[in-house]
Image (cartoon, rainbow, N blue to C red):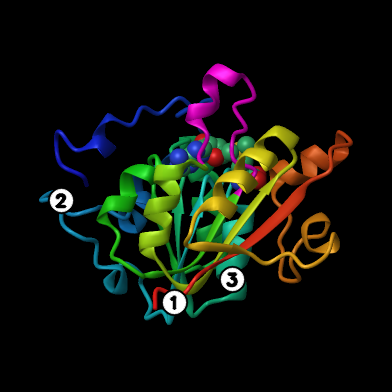
């Protein structure tokens, strides 16, 4: 974890950490399974050993920021058993939901950082992550809250550092203001190239897409999600 006095420690979490009381089975998962899957950055501000973070050897490591109830993460982990997926989510009810997917599907390639992803970034190695998902991040619609948005210049600098050359950044949102905000910041960042060639590339999800809970809800309410895929440019 970043040390005291580090700017990452001054990050304030504005979202929810807890919802309704967990059912006993979910509470038991939080107490027994979470400690085994938790990604704990070294106390001395060191770098996490991602190779040793998973119960199985993995060929690549992906990161999902704000996995909500974890259906997308669990489905990706099941579809790619040779990829380790780090899920970041401070909302304990969401973490408990992911844990139940991990247990029922017997997933060995998942680990969890149950806090703000931005606090984890300084402890991740350079050029270590092959894909990042930031799906339906909180849009913080009020102007005075925009600085709470996940996509921000400093977060993109961190993502650019931890992502491998050629790695993919997937962002999705149904909030027009957030889409415009994210697109403006990511396309002006020198490390990222937007992959869209035609309208279909952002109106339709990528082929291996797994619908998220929030996305399903948004569609039911008549919203139109937008899918933005970027490539981390080569460093050379
Ligand atoms: C609107 S929900 C979407 C959840 C899920 N991605 C989906 O599409 O169903 C946004 C989630 O992102 C989480 N979140 C927001 N900012 C985060 C951050 N900096 N690090 C980790 N999780 C974050 C919130 O706790 C919340 O669960």
SS class of the residue under badge 1? strand
Residue at the location (67% across, 67% down)?
Answer: 195
Q: How far apart are labels 1 and 2 at the CA level?
A: 23 Å
The first of marks 1 and 3 along the sequence is 1
Question: Can residue 139 be found in the magenta stretch?
Answer: yes
Question: Can residue 149 be found in the magenta stretch?
Answer: yes
- Write down the residue under mark 3: 78
SS class of the residue under badge 3? helix
Q: In this rendering, would 223 be left or right of 195?
A: right
The first of marks 1 and 2 along the sequence is 2
* Residue bounds of the magenta highlight: 135-150
* Ligand 1 found in image quarter: top right
Q: Which mark is residue 45?
A: 2
Where residue 93 appears, x then y in whole percent? 51, 36
Q: Quadrant of the C terminus?
A: bottom left
Is the residue at mark 3 in contact range of ligand 1, meaning its CB lies under 8 Å from it?
no
- Write down the residue under mark 1: 60
Estimate how packed mark 1 is, as few (under 14), some (14 to 19) or many (20 or more) residues with alpha carbons within 10 Å. some
Q: Which mark is residue 17?
A: none
Q: How far apart are labels 3 and 2 at the CA level?
A: 32 Å
Marks 1 & 3, CB-CB < 8 Å contact? no
């Amino acid at each position: 974890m970043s040390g005291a006095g580090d700017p990452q420690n001054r990050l304030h979490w504005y979202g929810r950490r807890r919802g309704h009381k967990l059912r006993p089975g979910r509470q038991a998962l939080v107490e027994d399974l979470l400690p085994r899957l938790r990604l704990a950055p070294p106390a001395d501000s060191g770098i996490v050993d991602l190779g040793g973070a998973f119960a199985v050897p993995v060929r690549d490591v992906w990161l999902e920021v704000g996995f909500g109830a974890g259906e997308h993460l669990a489905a990706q982990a099941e579809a790619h058993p040779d990829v380790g997926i780090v899920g970041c989510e401070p909302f304990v009810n969401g973490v408990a939901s992911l844990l139940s997917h991990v247990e029922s599907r017997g997933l060995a390639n998942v680990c969890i950082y149950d806090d703000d992803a931005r606090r984890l970034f300084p402890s991740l190695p350079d050029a270590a992550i092959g894909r990042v998902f930031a799906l339906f991040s909180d849009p913080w619609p009020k102007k005075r809250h925009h600085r709470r948005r996940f996509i921000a210049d400093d977060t993109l600098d961190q993502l650019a550092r931890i992502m491998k050359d050629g790695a993919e950044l997937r962002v999705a949102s149904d909030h027009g203001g957030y889409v415009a905000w994210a697109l403006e910041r990511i396309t002006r960042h020198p490390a990222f190239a937007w992959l869209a060639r035609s309208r279909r590339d952002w109106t339709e999800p990528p082929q291996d897409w797994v619908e998220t809970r929030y996305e399903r809800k948004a569609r039911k309410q008549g919203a139109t999600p937008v899918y933005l895929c970027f490539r981390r440019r080569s460093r050379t």
